[in-house]
Every structure is written in structure tokens, then in C-alpha cells.
Amino acid sequence: MRSAELHTLCEHTATGFAVLDADLRLRWANPALGERIGCSLARSRGVALAELAPGLLDAARRCLHDHRQLHLREITLGSTPLLQTSADVVLQALPDGTLLLELLPAASIGGTDYGRGLRTLAHELLNPLAGMRGAAQLLERDAMAPAQRELASLIREEVDRLAALAARLLRPSGTASKCAFDVHEPLQRVAALLAVQPDAPRVLRDYDPSLPPALGDTERILQLLLNLAHNAHEAGARTLTLRTRAEVGTRLPGGHRVLRIEVHDDGHGVPPDLRARLFEPWISGRSDGTGLGLALARAIAREHGGELDYAPADPGSLFVLRLPQAGDTP
């Protein structure tokens, strides 16, 4: 992957990235790396890796010489104030002779360390996503029909969202940027994304248009809802019902009024022996499943001060998301 592509992809991620030249001097870094090392990027450009992190120097030289990737675990980066941090470090030689340095924080979702698997997943997503984004941009530019341009734009936007998600998988919980938003906007996005998937379930909308705004991070709530929709699709659902209501007479912790979003599918449902542990990581009813989707979904709900619950339905499954109402004074 070219350095320019990495710049575009990594500029807004929460994971620290840097590109070093063939002499192992800092050529480029994203803002997240500047925060991690506690140094202005303008001042650190051109600085030698030997000054930033002397303990990485030998590994970086081997990586460039052998044209390979190295994953170094639990590294304390140097004795200088610039990189006094403990992190997993990924070094990857790039085709143009430069070196990509990536700082991975401890993977945490809802206070739980998910370890190597989740960190590796987030890292491995970056290369294919960059290629997908470039292809989508070409399609968007060259498409003749408006419908084709719209689909190409949808692909590009989803690639950007997934790149941000790869960073969020490694970000500690509780960092959502909350504002007032219409809960129907992410639901409509879910319906649009399902509509372009092969053999996707039919989406029924049962909305209350009078609902006040919710308080939260729209992108995170979208990810939560997409996880639920994806699970329904994988469970063989033919119909997915999206329902919104104000929940009268109940309050969330802190006294906030409740906005209720229901996602009901008519798929195979959850086996009874898995229901008690459904939201735990690595618990899945599918042989090829990781069980991370629902764990992430509940973590997102709780970092918003809300909750995500499951109830068996006949047929299928019912997931109930409760979010705080924006502008509500307990």
C-alpha cells in the first residue's frame, strides 16, 4: 500500500500510526500518534527513530531489510519522554521502501481485554479497506448512471466507517462523542445497507415520528444496529422489523427518560443454552462466529448510559435498545 493511501485512511483513527523513511526518520504521523507520544508532530517530523524509541531500532532495521511485518508485544517504548508508553507495536515494510509503525493500545471493550484476536482483526482490516476505498472512488467517478454512483458512494462511506470502527475496537469504552440525534436516521441507514445485500431480509418500519431526539454518538449507534441486523441475516431471517417508541414510566440510571428501539427478526433464534451468556465475547451459535458483535453492541449501549437486552420471540429474536432522551433533565 502506498504511503498516501495510508495517510488518507489513518488521519482520523484513534490508533497511532507513523511512516518512517528508509533512514528510519519520521516522515509522517497521524494526530493519534502525536497524542500518544505527547509531542507536536510538527516538531517531531524528521526525528530519528533512535531518539523516539531506541528499543525499536534493531527490529525496524530487520523489518526493512527482510521486507516483512513484525508484531512486538507489550513494548515499553524508550526512556525518553516522547514515547514513554506501553503498547503492542506493529512494524510493516511498505513497497516504496518506507516503514509503517503502528501503536496498538490494550484492546478493551466494556472493561474487558479481548487480547490478540481483536487487535489482529483491527490491524488486518486496514489494508483491504484502503484498496476497497480506492476502487469505490474510481467507480463513483466513472459511473454513468446516478444509481451506480449512489451505490459507489455508499460503498466508500461504509469503508470509511469500517476504518473508523477498526480504531474504535482498540479504544477504551466511555469515549463516545454524544449529541442529540434522530434515532430514525441510523435505522434508515441500516435499511439502506440491507437492501443492497443479496438475499437480505425484508425490512418493516414501525416508527413513532413524534419521538424526541436521543443522546449519543450516531456512528456508534449505527454500528450497534448493524451488528443486530447482520446477526438476523446470518440467522436466516426473512423479515426484520425496526420499531421505535417512547418508554413511559421507566428511567435509565441517572434518571433519564427512555427511547426504545426494537429489532425483531424471524430467524432461527438463539439456542436456550446460549441465552444466559449471549453478550459475552467469543460466545456464538455459529461455528464460524466470534461472538464479538453482540458484546460490542452491549458495550456501546452501556457507554451511552443505556442498555441492550435480548428476549426470545416466536419466531426469531427480539433485541431491545434503550437510549437516554436528549435534553432530558432528571
Image: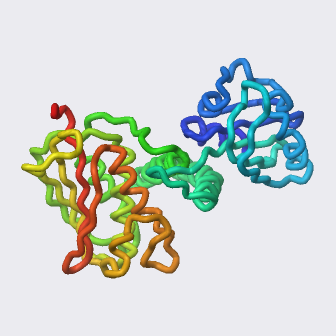
Q: Residue at x 82, y 32 (%)?
A: 49
Q: Residue at x 32, y 81 (%)?
A: 272
Q: Is residue 146 among the parts visible in the rendering?
A: no
Q: Is residue 309 above or below residue 72?
A: below
Measuring 40% from the left and 72% from the top, which residue is drawn there? 198
| Residue 58 visible in the shown view | yes
Question: Residue 247: x, y in percent?
Answer: 12, 51
Quarter-of-image position of residue 23: top right
Q: Residue drawn at (47%, 63%), measured in percent from left and top? A: 292
Q: Along the line of sight, which residue is nearer the eye, 13 or 37?
A: 37
Residue at the farthest left position: 249
Q: Quadrant of residue 14?
A: top right
Q: Which quarter of the rendered picture does the C terminus lie within?
A: top left
User: Percent from the top left, x then y, of residue 30?
Assistant: 63, 33
Please say if 265 is above or below 24.
below
Q: Is residue 231 left or right of residue 71?
A: left
